Structures are given as C-alpha cells and as structure tokens.
Image (cartoon, grey):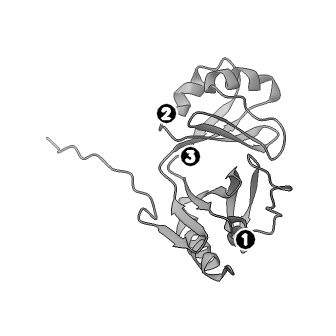
Amino acid sequence: MADMVEATRTQPNASFRRIHGSVSIEQAAFATRISLRAKSDAVAALSTALGLVLPVKPKTSSVSGLRSALWLGPDEWLVIDMSGGDLMAVCATADAMHSAVDISHRNTAFIVSGEDAADVLNAGCPQDLSLAAFPVGAVSRTLFGKAEVVLYRVTDDTFRVECWRSFAEYVGGLLREAASEVIF
C-alpha cells in the first residue's frame, strides 16, 4: 500500500519583506480567490450567496469582513477571501447562471504600504495613483513593469498588488528596486 503524502502550499516569496524608509513591501497572507463572471441579472443572487454586494461600477470594490470583491469588467470580478473560505461552494449555492473559477493557486499578492507607496508603484505603473484619482477602494487591472496585475487601494497609504505566481519574483524585484529609488 502506498504511503499518503499531503502537499503543502508555499508562497513564492514566503520570506519576502522589505522596509525601506517610508515604504513597507510584504508578501500577502494566503487567500482563496475566484474569477467570477456573470451577467447583470445574476448579480443579486451572487451577492447574497457571497455575503457582500458585487460592485457594478468601474474601478470599485466592496468588502465584508475578510472577503472582498473587485470589479474587473462589466461582468467580471476577482473575489478574495482572506479567511480561506470555500468560495466555489459559496457560489454554487447561488441560483443564478455564472462562471466561477478557483484561481487561488495561480495568484499571489504583495502589500505595499507607507506614505510613499503610490510613488513606488508609479515606478512600474503609469496610472495616476493620487487619492483624488485612485481613492480608497479603487481597483484597476493594469501593468506593473511588464506584468499584468490587479491593483487595489485598501487604505490611504496601502495597496494590494495581485499578480500571477509565475510573475511574483519579477514583481517583487521591481517593487524592491523601486522602493530603494524613492527619494525620502
């Protein structure tokens, strides 16, 4: 009889943490994530099932407890659950046509915080990240250097940068370099 082996999930940059002057960059804790697609008539049922209102306006998000829904397009959301909840099972309870794909293993995230966080991100992202143009709760699928990321402003001076695991070393390296270049 074969021995049973249980795989453990590791973060690509598990020991990654960088504090440089007024900027802190660290690997985000593990979270479950789904890519959710649905037409407008399914939004109410999915919102009820998920326990938060799916945002329907561009560049917006909603939060309930440890769960966030980030608007990525007219019929697309990235749903993140920091408690490790089973988002696929939750969506299966919704009596509405939708597509939910678990992307927990595909994505990872960095938390960039501090008074110069926006300047560090602007080293690789051409968007205006001022509070007036990119307020708390704003979300954008954009480029950071040459990697596609989802950028989410969590607080005045904290951003969550979601990227594919295969780009994590590149994104982390670019963040470290940008932090070392920021003028303090």
Question: Which label number is shown at residue 85?
Answer: 2
Task: Identify the element where label 1 is drawn.
Answer: helix
Residue 126 placement, left or right of 92: right
Residue 29 appears at what percent x and percent y? 48, 51
Residue 129 appears at what percent x and percent y? 79, 62
Q: Amino acid under label 1?
A: Asp
Q: On the image, which quarter does residue 150 sit in? A: bottom right
Q: Are marks 2 and 3 in contact (CB under 8 Å)?
A: no
The residue under the point 32% across, 49% down is 7
Within 10 Å of disc 1 (Cα), the crowding (few <14, some 14-19, many 20+) is many
Residue 12 appears at what percent x and percent y? 46, 62
The residue under the point 24% across, 47% down is 5
Within 10 Å of disc 3 (Cα), the crowding (few <14, some 14-19, many 20+) is some
Question: Which label number is shown at residue 119?
Answer: 1
Residue 10 appears at what percent x and percent y? 39, 56
Q: Nearer the viewer, mark 2 or mark 3?
A: 2
If the image is split into quadrants, where does the C terminus sit? bottom right
Residue 121 placement, left or right of 89: right
Q: Amino acid under label 3?
A: Ile
Q: CA distance from mark 2 to mark 3?
A: 13 Å
Question: Which label number is shown at residue 103?
Answer: 3
Q: CA distance from mark 3 to mark 1?
A: 29 Å
Within 10 Å of disc 2 (Cα), the crowding (few <14, some 14-19, many 20+) is some
Q: CA distance from mark 2 to mark 1?
A: 34 Å
Mark 2 vs mark 3: which is more N-terminal? 2
Q: Is residue 148 above or below residue 54?
A: below
Question: Which label number is shown at residue 97?
Answer: none
